[in-house]
Image (cartoon, grey):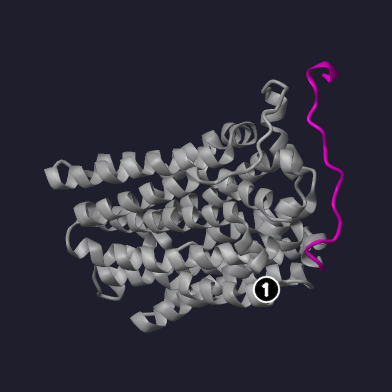
């Protein structure tokens, strides 16, 4: 752990991600609660997720190529700065009395577009700042900060909302500004590619993932498991209509998965994953499905918090194993594009999963929609165990490294 603390650039990245994640969580709590107050519609909560996903999907490949061709730290800083401006705009809109459903949906579009660049930039920075032997531990250590932010962000955001939406938006904006400052302080080597950007290089990340079954299996497992099992969009419904609590209760529900994830991240940092990586990945996703089913059936706040915490702990296992495998199997010149594909899958699972949950809840109710999604997650685990045996039986994280593909030069095409 001393080696990680010795890397000043890594610590700046860690601080920027923690501050940015805290601010994002506050912003999402305020957006979700305000939307449900304005419209009382589960469909509109789902739309917030869908409208974050669509621009992220459209921009994923250009964003990945941009990350591989530009200074990653400055790009990360720019994404945090844009979100700071958005948070302050929403605060001003609420204070002025002109905030409405259309503005909230528009904010979701901006968040999706910006995060299309933010996620691959910060994912590609970590392996550039720490040696491969420390990557799994660095990812777990990063997760400690991120999960702490996911715990504190929604809880603080929920309580700040009690003082008014403007206060919650302003606090989020201030944290985004601080995160921008830390991102600008990151120093790392950056070699600008000499070859021009082409359609071939634009789609290289997709081809890389498709041609490696282990990477494809790891990324798509998360995609379909969370796409089916996500309940994040339904938390305002559960908080208000099932558990009969307020914005503070919503903040606790959003923070609960991070409590479990933080506890598991501390365990993995102390005892990193060395063997049976594939079975641990599969087991983590399976427990996530079981815990989500427990949440769907719960009518008590304490039990709902406990099941969400268990889901978060299980998800942390899959996150560390999956991200370590993807980063270790990818050469640095392609990490931006491969991270963009991975981010697209994460976005699809999160934002598209929120839309699926919201649409299903509008038809059959929130508890039934959540239960059906949890069962579908368990079916995904069973299917992926058969479809990707190399992933399911993978033992060590650092097993073999494929030869690094070279970027084609203009004369070689």
Measured as percent of width and height from the top left, residue 348 is found at 53, 49
Mark 1 — residue?
283
Q: Quadrant of the C terminus?
A: top right
Along the line of sight, which residue is nearer the eye, 92 or 345? 92
Q: Position of residue 144 (x, y in %)?
A: 53, 68
Magenta-drawn segment = 395-413
Q: Quadrant of residue 137?
A: bottom right
The image shows residue 128 at horizontal and vertical percentages of 68, 48
What's the residue at 42%, 62% (across, down)?
232
User: Magenta part mainly helix, strand or loop?
Assistant: loop
Q: Residue at x 75, y 47 (%)?
A: 330
User: Is residue 410 a member of the stretch shown in magenta?
Assistant: yes
Please name whichever residue, 271 or 65, is drawn nearer the observer in this view of the structure: 271
Is 183 positioned to the left or the right of 237 in the image?
Answer: right
Mark 1 Cα-neighbour bin, 10 Å: few <14, some 14–19, many ≥20: some
Quadrant assignment for the N terminus: bottom right
Q: In this rendering, does residue 360 appear at all?
A: no
In which image quadrant can residue 90 be found? top left
Front one among 7 and 120: 7
**In the displayed structure, does residue 43 sit left or right of residue 412?**
left
Side of 23 where 292 appears, left or right = right
Say whether residue 282 is left or right of residue 228.
right
């Amino acid at each position: 752990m001393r080696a990680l603390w010795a890397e000043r650039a890594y610590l700046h990245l860690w601080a920027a991600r923690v501050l940015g994640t805290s601010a994002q969580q506050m912003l999402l709590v305020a957006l979700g609660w305000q939307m449900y107050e304005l419209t009382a519609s589960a469909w509109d909560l789902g739309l917030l997720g869908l409208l974050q996903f669509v621009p992220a999907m459209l921009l994923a490949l250009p964003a990945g190529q941009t990350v591989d061709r530009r200074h990653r730290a400055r790009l990360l800083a720019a994404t945090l700065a844009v979100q700071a401006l958005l948070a302050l705009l929403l605060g001003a809109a609420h204070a002025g009395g002109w905030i409405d459903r259309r503005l909230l949906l528009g904010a979701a579009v901006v968040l999706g577009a910006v995060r299309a660049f933010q996620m691959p930039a910060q994912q590609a920075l970590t392996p550039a700042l720490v040696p491969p032997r420390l990557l799994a531990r660095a990812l777990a250590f990063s997760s400690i900060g991120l999960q702490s932010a996911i715990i504190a962000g929604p809880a603080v955001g929920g309580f700040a909302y009690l003082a008014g939406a403007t206060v919650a938006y302003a606090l989020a904006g201030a944290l985004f500004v601080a995160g921008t400052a830390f991102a600008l302080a990151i120093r790392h080597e950056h070699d600008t590619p000499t070859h021009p950007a082409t359609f071939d290089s634009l789609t290289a990340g997709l081809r890389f993932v498709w041609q490696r079954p282990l990477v494809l299996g790891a990324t798509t497992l998360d995609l379909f498991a969370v796409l089916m099992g996500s309940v994040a969009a339904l938390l305002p419904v559960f908080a208000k209509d099932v558990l009969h609590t307020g914005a503070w209760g919503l903040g606790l529900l959003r923070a609960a998965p991070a409590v479990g994830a933080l506890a598991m991240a501390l365990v993995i940092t102390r005892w990193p994953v060395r063997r049976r990586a594939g079975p641990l990945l599969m087991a983590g996703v399976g427990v996530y499905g079981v815990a989500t089913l427990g949440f769907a059936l719960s009518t008590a706040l304490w039990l709902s918090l406990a099941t969400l915490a268990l889901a978060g702990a299980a998800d942390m296992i899959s996150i560390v194993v999956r991200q370590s495998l993807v980063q270790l199997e990818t050469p640095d010149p392609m990490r931006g594009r491969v991270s963009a594909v991975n981010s697209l899958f994460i976005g699809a699972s999160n934002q598209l999963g929120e839309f699926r949950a919201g649409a299903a809840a509008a038809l059959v109710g929130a508890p039934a929609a959540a239960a059906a999604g949890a069962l579908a997650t368990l079916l995904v685990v069973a299917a992926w165990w058969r479809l990707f045996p190399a992933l399911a039986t993978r033992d060590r994280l650092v097993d073999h490294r494929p030869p690094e593909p070279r970027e084609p030069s203009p004369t070689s095409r």
